């Protein structure tokens, strides 16, 4: 896979029939219909294991990182990628990276999971925005740029790069501990912008604007420190 430049020994390169996915999906009919109508093709491209990478597995309690799957999903159109990625992450208990493709753009989807008692709990899904295939920031996902301490740290380094990309170009060198703070500030800033737009009372608009400026100042301080 060009984006990740994984070792050749990891290559699987097999089509996965869509029917296998939606027939086994424990989801309502509306959910399945979205999947059927939006997914063009599924390609199981790579499987990273200790045997083909020398990266140690990590299995502890409900965390299972004994191998990592890389699966390409070709979509017919944009718009339902979040729903499709959620369904797929729920179906596969292993750590998985989905590379969604639509025309000349791609979206990378990752998820933190807990596995136990024949169930998969999705803790959090992290998707990039749609990116042009030639986007320079995709080079950050190159195999040599990812942590090789163990399978968990390898996967988490991919998740971290997804989160940093979503924070924007100004955050390329952001510290790991600041990622969650910036994500929260960005959400709060967008919520305040929406409130300001809807508010009709002048005194409330002023109050919201002051709070908005405060949050923006906090964000800029973290980015520039």
Image (cartoon, rainbow, N blue to C red):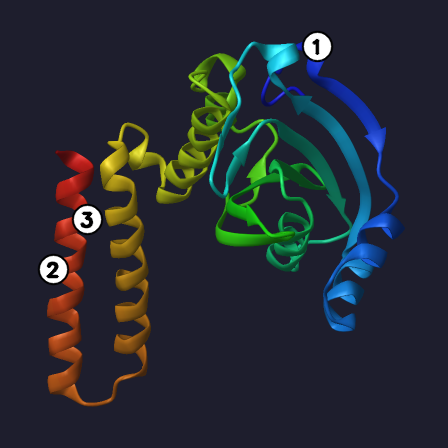
Compared to 25, does 4 lie above or below? Answer: above
> Alpha-carbon distance for marks 3 and 1?
41 Å
Looking at this rendering, what residue extends furthest in the bottom direction? 201
Quadrant of the frame with the C terminus: top left
Q: What element carries label 2?
A: helix
Q: Nearer the viewer, residue 102 or 114?
A: 114
Q: Which of 99 and 190 is in front in this view?
A: 99
Position of 14 with respect to 11 (left or right) is right
CB atoms of marks 3 and 2 within 8 Å = no
Q: Nearer the viewer, residue 123 or 2?
A: 123
For marks 3 and 1 on the same chain, the one whose residue lies earlier in the sequence:
1
> Alpha-carbon distance for marks 3 and 2?
9 Å
Quadrant of the frame with the N terminus: top right
Q: Residue at x 66, y 59 (%)?
A: 80
For disc 3, the neighbor class at 10 Å (few under 14, some 14 to 19, many from 20) is some
Q: Residue at x 73, y 41 (%)?
A: 73
Q: On residue 8, which mark appears? A: 1
Position of 92 with respect to 147 (left or right) is right
For disc 3, the marked residue is 219
Q: Residue at x 76, y 32 (%)?
A: 44
Q: On residue 69, which mark appears? A: none
For disc 2, the marked residue is 214
Q: Where is residue 126 in the image (x, y as percent from the top left)?
A: 48, 46
For marks 2 and 1 on the same chain, the one whose residue lies earlier in the sequence:
1
Comparing marks 3 and 1, which lies closer to the viewer?
Answer: 1
Q: Where is residue 174 in the image (x, y as percent from the top left)?
A: 26, 32
Q: Which residue is drawn at 51% across and 47% down?
A: 114
Compared to 147, does 44 lie above or below? Answer: below
Position of 39 with respect to 162 (left or right) is right
Where residue 52 sits, quadrant-wise, is: top right
């Amino acid at each position: 896979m060009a984006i990740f430049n994984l070792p050749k020994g990891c290559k699987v390169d097999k089509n996965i029939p869509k029917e296998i996915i939606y027939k086994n999906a424990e989801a309502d009919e509306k959910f399945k219909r979205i999947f059927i109508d939006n997914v063009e093709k599924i390609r199981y491209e790579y499987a990273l294991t200790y045997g083909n990478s020398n990266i140690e597995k990590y299995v502890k309690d409900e965390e299972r990182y004994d191998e990592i799957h890389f699966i390409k999903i070709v979509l017919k159109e944009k718009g339902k990628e979040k729903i499709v990625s959620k369904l797929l992450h729920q179906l596969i208990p292993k750590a998985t990276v989905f590379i969604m493709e639509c025309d000349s753009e791609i979206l990378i989807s990752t998820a933190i999971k807990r596995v136990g008692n024949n169930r998969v709990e999705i803790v959090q899904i992290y998707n990039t925005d749609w990116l042009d295939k030639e986007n320079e920031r995709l080079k950050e996902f190159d195999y040599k740029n990812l942590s090789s301490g163990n399978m968990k740290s390898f996967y988490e380094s991919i998740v971290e790069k997804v989160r940093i990309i979503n924070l924007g170009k100004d955050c390329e060198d952001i510290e790991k501990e600041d990622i969650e703070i910036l994500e929260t500030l960005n959400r709060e800033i967008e919520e305040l912008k929406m409130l300001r737009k809807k508010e009709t009372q002048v005194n409330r608009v002023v109050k919201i604007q002051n709070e908005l400026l405060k949050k923006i100042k906090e964000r800029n301080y973290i980015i520039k420190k």
